[in-house]
Each structure stands twice: as C-alpha cells, then as structure tokens.
Image (cartoon, helix red, strand yellow):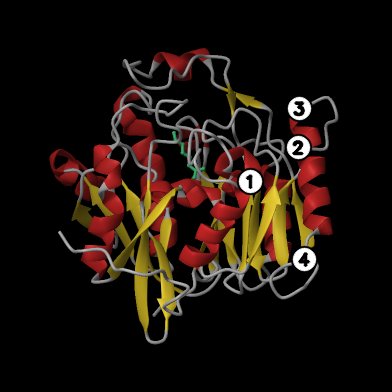
Amino acid sequence: MSEALQGTPAADGFRMPGEFEPHEATWMLWPVRGDTWRDGAGPVQEAFCEVAGAIAAAEPVRMGVPPGQIERATAMLPPAVEVVEMESDDAWMRDVGPSIVVGEGTRRGVDWRFNAWGGELGGLYDNWEKDEEVARQVLEFEGMDRYRAPLILEGGSIHVDGEGTCITTEECLLNPNRNPELDREQIERHLQDYLGVSKVIWLGLGVVEDETDGHVDDVVFFARPGVVGLQWCEDESDPQHARSVDALERLRAARDAKGRELEVVLLPNPGPLYMTEQEAAGIEPAPGTLPRPAGERLAGSYANCYLANGRVIAPMLDERTDDEALSVLAELFPEREVVPVPGREILLGGGNVHCITQQVPAG
Ligand code: KQY
C-alpha cells in the first residue's frame, strides 16, 4: 500500500478543478447490493450501463467491479468502458472516490475519511471497510500520489468552481455524525487546505428526505465560475420550498472567491417522488442497513447531473418536469450536448448520476 503524502494540497500549490473543466476520464462503481437496489440490482445495472455509455461517448470511463461480477459487467457494459477489478460496499464513486487536485504539471488525489454517511448516528450501512479503500485504489491505478485528509467527507457534499470557491451545506458538513470535534471555522480550514479554496459558501439544508444529510450535489452545481444551477421548488405547500428559498437567498447574498456575485439559474423540482410498493418489494432488507419502505419520499434532483467533456448527463426523473429541465440545461450549456439518461432506478438507491461518477481532471 502506498504511503500518504505529508502536508496539504494547498500548501503544495494544488487546487481541485471545477467539474466543468476538461477531464481525462470518469470513474464509476458497479452496483450489486440487494438491500440498496431492487431485483438483485439488475434494473439499476442497466441504468449504470446507460450512464457509462453516455459518458464514454465523450471521455474514457473506468468501472470498478467486484471479482464475482466481472463477467456479467463486461457483458453488459458498452465495450468502450474499461472494467477494473475493485471491491466496494456500494456504488457511490462520488462519495468514496478521491477528489483529484492539480498542480504545476502534476495531479494528486485527496483520500477523505468515510463513515457511510453518518456512522453510528444514521449511517446507511454498518460496514464500509471496502468503501474506505476505494480512493486509494483509484489513485494507485492512476499513478497519482495521495493525501489522506483528516476530515470525514463525501465528494457529493462539496462543489468547487476551480477558482477558489467551494459550496457546501451546514446540514451535512456541520452534522454531529461527521466531524463532531470540529467547528465551522476548523472545517472551513480543512476545505481550504485540501481543496485549494479560499472561500466557502454555506447553504443551509439539502433536499427533503435526503439520506446523505443534505448533500449539496442534490441542490446546486457550478456550470462555470460565477454561474450556478439551483434546484428550485415552486410549490409553497411542499417543505422543499422553504429550503429552496433559503438556498436562493444565500446564493444571491454570496460573493465567490474572486468577489463576484453568482448568477443563479433555476431548475424545476421533480415530483415529489415516492418509492412504490412494487419497487420496495424488490429490495431485500438486511440488518444494519437503511430500510427502503414503500411510500418513502425520494430525493430526486436535476441538479444531480454530471458534466462530462462537451456533455451534460442529465437524470430523467418525472415526465411532468423532464422536458423543462432539459431546456434549462440546454440554455445553461449552449456549448455542450445535453444527454438524458434514466434516473429512477438510481434514485431508488438514494442518489443519482452525479453521485455515481467521479472525474479525473485533465493533466
Ligand atoms: O453524492 C450523493 N448525493 C450520494 C448519494 C448516496 C446515497 C447512498 N445510498
């Protein structure tokens, strides 16, 4: 196992690029858990193949697959997707993969600590040993040196603009189930040190019933420096409305690291969406993992899209709002092709396209 570097990315002159900057590749993990995914994970594997294919048309995709699934994954995935043997506890590469930072002529990775979204205080499964090893293995595969960050953090809880700004939520990063020994200032300091940012914009709550405790990647994303897309709930009777209003007010009041105001583009809110009886019946409950009962509200969001080279991979979630979401994204990204992919099966596991991908920025 490779030794972690001493020091921090910021002190060594590294920064995390925005997702909208050019990529060398994208990493994903193959879903298998019957207590997260219904019907033995078959339907969601199809959905992962569609996402992987949509990205692979634009840049290389590497899929981490456990040994017992190599044959099946290879048969199902588009041939352009590289299958890499890798164990994981579930399939959320955004959260368990490395945040890759770039410096003068080289790239390195940040390997965050992980506790399955809350450990003993609301974590989603009780054993995450394999997930803890994913970032290191990805970085070894890429031949990149590794910083081991002292912070428990999932990649879906931060977004950066590559020019010194990070957006996150208080609900997640200040949650006592992540880093209870650290206060807001200390957490900001770690974000500065490990992401190479100088400004942190704090939103309040994430989306309603988000099992990750309010990941920012279901709320907002940087389309480019100075411009964000925000999930916006118009319906005042929906508890999501007050959260959207608060997020909009905070974003409008904020200045980024370069002192700019943010332009905020509003995306529609799908649903509200709920787990159906039929979907819930296909999930095999297991002790020590989050139950996924029928009737539960799902944390659907078009903000959980992924920016691949020249493309926006957008989850389709609700036929009442999908077209509007696609037109807003097309207007927001005139230089990219907006590619719709089926989002429902991935949403049943608690996340979406952004949560299952992790970019390797170009060198
Ligand atoms: O980055 C994300 N928002 C990840 C969602 C993880 C869901 C775990 N079941």
Nearest to the observer: residue 337 or residue 305: 305
Disc 2 from disc 3: Cα separation: 7 Å
Q: Is mark 1 on a helix, strand or loop?
A: strand
What's under tag 1, amino acid-wise? Thr
Q: Position of residue 244 (x, y in %)?
A: 77, 41
Callouts 4 and 2 close, C-beta under 8 Å: no
Camera-near label (4 vs 2) is: 4
Q: In which quarter of the image is the C terminus?
A: bottom left
Spatial separation of the CA atoms under disc 4 and disc 3:
27 Å
Few, some or many residues within 10 Å of mark 2 (<14, 14–19, 20+): many
Q: Which amino acid does label 4 sit on?
A: Arg
* Marks 2/1: CA–CA distance: 11 Å
Give residue 169's mark: 1
Q: What element carries label 2?
A: helix
Of the image marks 1 and 3, the number of the one nearer the N terminus: 1
Q: Which is nearer the N-term, disc 2 or disc 1?
A: 1
Residue 79 located left or right of residue 183: left
Q: Which of marks 4 and 3 is in front?
A: 4
Q: What residue sits right under mark 4 in the picture?
A: 255
Looking at marks 4 and 2 on the same chain, the residue that comes earlier in the sequence is marked by: 2
Q: Which amino acid does label 2 sit on?
A: Arg
Q: Say which mark, if any, is on residue 239.
A: 3
Distance Cα–Cα, label 4 vs label 1:
16 Å
Residue appearing at x 68%, y 28% in the figure: 272
| Residue highlighted by disc 2 | 243
Amino acid on which the number 3 mark rests in the picture:
Pro
